[in-house]
Amino acid sequence: MTQPTSPDWPRIAAAVWRRHRQGLRPIRRLDPIQWHQLTGIERQQQALARNTERFLAGQPSNNALLWGARGTGKSSLIKALLNRYRDQGLRMVEVDKDDLVFLPEIVDDLSEQPFRFVIFCDDLSFETGESGYKALKSVLEGSLELPPENVRVYATSNRRHLMPEYMADNLNSQVHNGELHPAEAIEEQVSLADRFGLQLSFYAFAQDVYLQAVDALFPTVADRDALHREAIRFATSRGVRNGRTAQQFYRQFGGETADGSEPA
């Protein structure tokens, strides 16, 4: 097998690891989502932007874990982050959970580059018995060798601790002299997430926040009351209010409402 060539980092902003070719494939068509298009997650935007700006400036910065309810903008925030800071030297490498075993090799190559890299792990979680997180641990905090100064890991997950939590684990915890001593299983669960110095929580949208997201997607619709009724009906049929639901509502009714008419 021929040795894969390194991406042309001065010209591209992102790449994805492909196991079959044992190398990085440049991403030519990036998601165009922009920073200002995100709604309802201003607190998380500010915190992640500040951390990323410190990273780009060579100041102390943290690995980041974005966790919480599905469809609330975690992945969109990472994509918009790249679009916002790519001209300032930010580059991104997406690595699937099943390929984390290759992370040390990936990071070795990136450490020689003059750019700042975010390793993006989307929808990250581990089941009992999986060992892929061990490679991630070494990149987050190093082992004998310190982790590279120009690489950070940003991950999204529906699980706060990235690993399953069982009632039995809590039952195995003990109290000695008034102090709680968590069971070993809990210590293992928490130890991975603890390596992410910045942890941002995401929750399902309140109705007013959901409607703000809808309004941002339908800026020319005149009859806001009718639009909101249909948007609420759409969200109710799916049982969840979040940014993804607002996007799905737009994809279904955007053409019909582009001229200001009520969605049917």
Image (cartoon, rainbow, N blue to C red):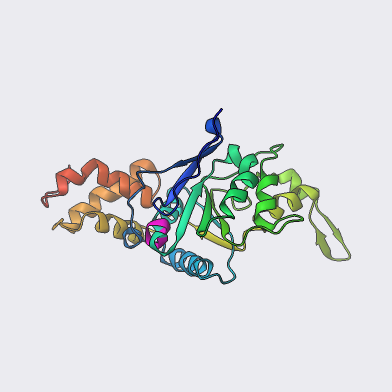
The total of numbered circles placed on residues is: 0
Report whether 215 appears left or right of 208.
left
Residue 83 in the image: x percent, y percent?
A: 37, 57
- Residue 135 appears in the figure: yes
Picture residue at 70% right of the left edge, 50% below the top: 189
Say if 205 sits above or below 43 in the image.
above
- Residue 205 appears in the figure: no
Q: Quadrant of residue 218?
A: bottom left
Q: Which residue is at the front of the view, 60 or 204?
A: 60
Report whether 150 appears left or right of 127.
left
Q: Quadrant of residue 45?
A: bottom left
Say if 50 sits above or below 199 in the image.
below
Report whether 180 appears left or right of 19.
right
Q: Which residue is at the front of the view, 144 or 209?
A: 144
- Majority secondary structure of the magenta segment? helix
Residue 130 in the image: x percent, y percent?
A: 69, 37
Residue 57 in the image: x percent, y percent?
A: 51, 71
Picture residue at 53% right of the left edge, 61% below the top: 200
Picture residue at 85% right of the left edge, 66% below the top: 178
Q: Residue furthest top?
A: 1
Q: Which residue is at the front of the view, 62 or 90?
A: 90
Quarter of the figure with the N terminus: top right
Residue 206 in the image: x percent, y percent?
A: 39, 59
Check if residue 71 falls in the magenta segment. no
Q: Residue furthest right?
A: 177
Give, as a single range, the part of the protein colored magenta: 81-85
Q: Quadrant of residue 60?
A: bottom right
Quarter of the figure with the C terminus: top left
